[in-house]
Image (cartoon, rainbow, N blue to C red):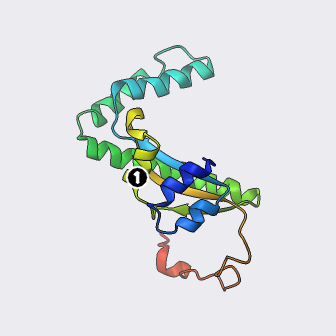
């Protein structure tokens, strides 16, 4: 999303509204509010069509998914679909880094405001995270010249 008017509306719910307004693009990562039989089938029907496989090729797998997720409450479904969006966020961050494009992953925003402004509910979606995209403004980037601080590997990685 790069519409300045929409970014302005969304920035009112952001912890760092200047970053949202200044980013050339804001990517919203949203997840299904819950699993449905139709949603699961649509994903796997699309996959089989794109790969030229016979319809129903993944039937036993989709039946298993449905038996696990459909009986669960919507809150548990959303917790799972929300975690799935972090895979896409990670890949987007890595690709932008490869292209030397600056990005910032964001959770500091008002999800309800984003969902309302973008009318995500009508699509069965809820916002999870954002990614600000653009090029850092060296004059405004007060931490850009500071030493990067990383927790030592030994403190957050367990090797077995």
Check the image and name the residue furthest to the right. 99
Check the image and name the residue furthest to the top. 54
Q: Quadrant of residue 132?
A: bottom right
Q: Please state the horizontal and vertical placement of residue 78, each as a whole percent of the image.
A: 34, 45
**Which SS class for mark 1?**
helix
Give the residue displayed 33% in from the left and 38% down from the top. 34
Q: Quadrant of residue 63?
A: top left
Residue under pointer 1: 113
95 left or right of 132 in image: right
Q: Please state the horizontal and vertical placement of residue 8, each as a whole percent of the image.
A: 54, 56
Q: Quadrant of residue 93?
A: bottom right
Give the residue displayed 35% in from the left and 40% down from the top. 33
Q: Please state the horizontal and vertical placement of residue 13, each as a whole percent of the image.
A: 43, 60
- Given residues 142 and 63, the one toward you in this image is 142
- Given residues 58 and 104, the one toward you in this image is 104
Q: Is residue 71 above or below residue 100?
A: above
Check the image and name the residue furthest to the front. 5
Give the residue displayed 68% in from the left and 56% down from the top. 24
């Amino acid at each position: 999303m790069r519409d300045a008017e929409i970014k302005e509306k969304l920035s009112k719910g952001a912890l760092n509204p200047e970053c949202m307004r200044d980013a050339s693009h804001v990517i919203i990562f949203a997840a299904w509010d819950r699993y449905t039989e139709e949603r699961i089938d649509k994903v796997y029907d699309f996959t089989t069509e794109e790969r030229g496989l016979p319809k129903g090729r993944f039937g036993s797998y989709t039946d298993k998914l449905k038996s696990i997720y459909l009986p669960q409450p919507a809150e548990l479904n959303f917790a799972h679909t929300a975690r799935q969006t972090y895979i896409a966020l990670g890949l987007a961050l890595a690709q932008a880094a490869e292209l030397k494009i600056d990005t910032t992953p964001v959770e500091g925003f008002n999800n309800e405001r984003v969902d309302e402004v973008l009318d995500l509910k009508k699509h069965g979606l809820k916002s999870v995270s954002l990614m600000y995209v653009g090029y850092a403004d060296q004059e405004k980037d007060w931490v850009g010249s500071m030493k990067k601080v990383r927790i030592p590997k030994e403190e957050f990685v367990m090797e077995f």
